[in-house]
Amino acid sequence: MRKIGPMAVALGAMLASTSYAQTPAEAAAAAAPPPGSETGEIIVTAQRRSESLQNTPIAVTAVTAEVVQRLGLNSAVDIAAVTPGASFTTTLGFFSPHIRGIGTDFVSVGIEAPVAVYEDGAYLTRTLTVNEILDNFDIGSIQVLRGPQGTLYGRNATGGVIIINSADPTSKFEGRVRAEYGNLDHQQVNAMINVPLGEDLALRATGSYKHDDGFVHNLTRGDDVGGGRVYSARAKLRWTPGNADIVLGGQYYNTQYSLGPLATLGRNDSTCYACVLVPGVVRPSVGFYETENNTTIQPVRTEYYGANLSMTFDMGSFTLSSTTTFRRQKSVNSSSDSDYTPFPLFEFSVPKSGGTSYTQDLLVTSKLEGRFNYLFGLSYLHDKGFFNPRFLGVAFGGNMDPDTAPGFDDSAKTQSYAAFLEGYYDLTDQLKVTVGGRYTYEERTAHGFTNAGFAALFGIPGAFSIDLRDAQRAFTPRLVLAWDNGPTNLYYSFTRGFKAGGFPGPFIFPVEPVQAEKIFSHEVGLKQTMFDNRVRLNAAAFYFKNKNQQVQTLDLNSGGTITDNAGAVENYGLELEAQITPTEGLNLGLSGAWQHARYKPFRNAALACFDPTGASNPTAPGATLYPCLIDVTGTAPSFAPEWTGSFNASYGFAIGDWTASLSGIAQYRSSINFQPGAGGELQEDRDGSLFTANLSGYVSPPGEKLRVGFYANNVFDKAYQAFRQTAQPYGVYYNAAKPRTYGLRLEYAF
């Protein structure tokens, strides 16, 4: 078992929708449909080469810049609204994707998420502020690959892969400016300019600023929390001499959010240990969008910058590609009031966290004229992360200074090496077989230093340190058999996936590593195009079972969560997507997903038991919640609703010489667990079914350079929990999702 932090961070689910388009760089203009239509060919790179979405034997959702703009999908979280079986959430700054019931709440320095995220070719090891990094303004492509991707994107992709690329420079001079203003004092400005610098050289740059007020009122401090600001800049320089395509990019993000005090007590009763120790400090009840915690530390600030170099060379019979990336992220003042009350009993701070990463990928893609083709690749990652929590408040000696409070410093270094090969053979003109495999080798080292103040809590005189090391290896094969006659593509695939284990911090004493998670998956899919491309129907049936599922559960002794290996998760289900264009200007999307995900088995999940007398707690006298091990075999894992569905519609029409568009998305999901076993005996960490809807639209004068529009999210003003947990110090808390938000948009393109 491994503790990975003081709080598990996750949000409630946005769910399932239809399959949309993605095109690489300048091919978009030729391949993408005209505005208001979805009947053009859709090009994806889910198999690390450009091909039609309908010909790709993978369950993949793809989204164009046109659809992003028309449906108002303005962040990484919003992409789940058009992805069957997916739940992308964020709270306290952490991006938490789940696909087909596989995901994680919080990523620490020594272990990553099971849904891999790639941004402009770079694998992202950390998820703090990812929602801002993956802002969808001026995107080039978005793809969500559902299910394990064991060969081509084989590292930490047992749940799937999210690939988001910003737009590349083109040979056309153009620009775009968008401004928004809405309730909660939402202010946002985005700008893009693309400038040709010569016959084969072009520059594309974007900049953005966003500000939001908080939406949860702190009764203790009198302010609102959950808001903040972000500004960013990105630039790409593209050079296309002869047979080469070279893109050099750089980016910078700076965010500041008051996220630490966002949590609210879910039960103001005897389950709140602080309420028992200090009677009368908490009101009998507070409003849904109210909290009483007393965190006094400044908002969390994060700086993120990176560079990437992508080079592609056409060598005739094959294409050689290289992607080199560097990323650095640093956050300061991450903090929370862990007792969620006005009394400074259990406080928590992370003065500094983050890390640096470097990746190098080489890819050879054949272009042979015969029945056989191949793809070969090498991949390397070097990452070093750091995390230094501090424990403040009366329970830890009363020290409220993060620089001198009891705590420890953890760091972890990862080096990953991989080689993969796939071969494609056309048995007939319509029948193709794909066989591939990937070999991955990883080394992890970890260092932990515990200061004297924290060591004293364990009765140890003086500071101490530890060093840990682990190595893992895996082979993940893939087999696909596909029959494609043009309008119909029927396929079967078998895939193994691998998620690295390691030492998820905080690590204070020498510990055994969490074991690697391995998965095997079977999938049968149908992709059907009908009625002159006016109807696309894609369906997938899947079955998978994994071994040593990495699961986050509760640690009531010291706070936060534990990463442990469950025996397995077994899941099978159906996913359906339909995109219909019944008439010009009208686009309809419909999707649904059903899954049956269960732990098979999970015998000793660390969760919370309840004793109203407080006599059963071995470490905290009087606390009614105490740590225990519970058999949750046969229950659903976190964020794995049985049913999800969505419907979206957009209609473009004329108003005299002007044009206009109206769009909407409605989503449904059945009940979910936020924690394994719903958190333990109280069954508090669960949420019922949820239905939400968003609307957007615009009008445009002749020429369509200017757009004046509106947006309204959560239009029915549903008050629902984004996340709920029974947690240290012996209480139940929740994070509220945003209430209804609405505003105006103004956009000008040239």
Image (spheres, rainbow, N blue to C red):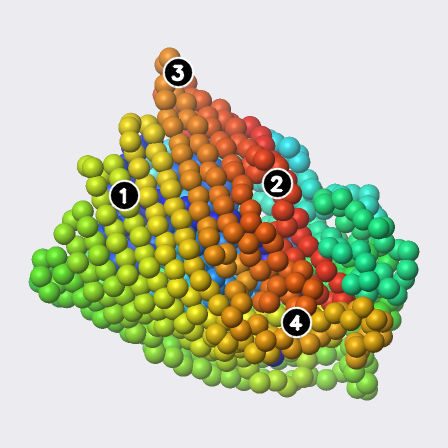
Secondary structure of the residue carrying numbered label 3: strand
Secondary structure of the residue carrying numbered label 1: strand
> Mark 1 touching mark 3, by CB under 8 A?
no
Q: Where is residue 656 in the image (x, y as percent from the top left)?
A: 37, 13
| Residue at left offset 58%, top offset 30% | 743
Mark sitting earlier along the chain (1/3): 1
Q: Which quadrant is the N terminus positioned in? A: bottom right
Q: What distance separates the C-alpha of mark 1 from that of mark 3?
A: 29 Å
Report whether residue 8 is seen.
no
Q: Position of residue 7 (x, y in %)?
A: 67, 64
- Report the label total: 4
Q: Which quadrant is the C terminus positioned in? A: top left
Mark 2 crowd level (few <14, some 14–19, many ≥20, 10 Å Cα): some
> Mark 3 touching mark 4, by CB under 8 A?
no
Q: Up-down: is 487 above or below 481?
A: above
> Mark 3 touching mark 2, by CB under 8 A?
no
For residue 150, what is the image quadrant?
bottom left
Q: Up-down: is 704 above or below 600?
A: above
**Which kind of residue does numbered mark 4 sit on?**
Leu
Which residue bears the numbered disc 1? 536
Mark 4 crowd level (few <14, some 14–19, many ≥20, 10 Å Cα): many
Q: Residue 718 carries which label?
A: 2
Mark 1 crowd level (few <14, some 14–19, many ≥20, 10 Å Cα): many
Q: Position of residue 311 (x, y in %)?
A: 31, 58
Mark sitting earlier along the chain (1/2): 1
Mark sitting earlier along the chain (2/4): 4
**Which kind of residue does numbered mark 1 sit on?**
Arg
Q: Judge depth for marks 3 and 4 and give the one in front.
A: 4
Direction from residue 454 to residue 569 in the image, left or right = left
Mark sitting earlier along the chain (4/1): 1
Nearer to me, 443 or 82 = 82
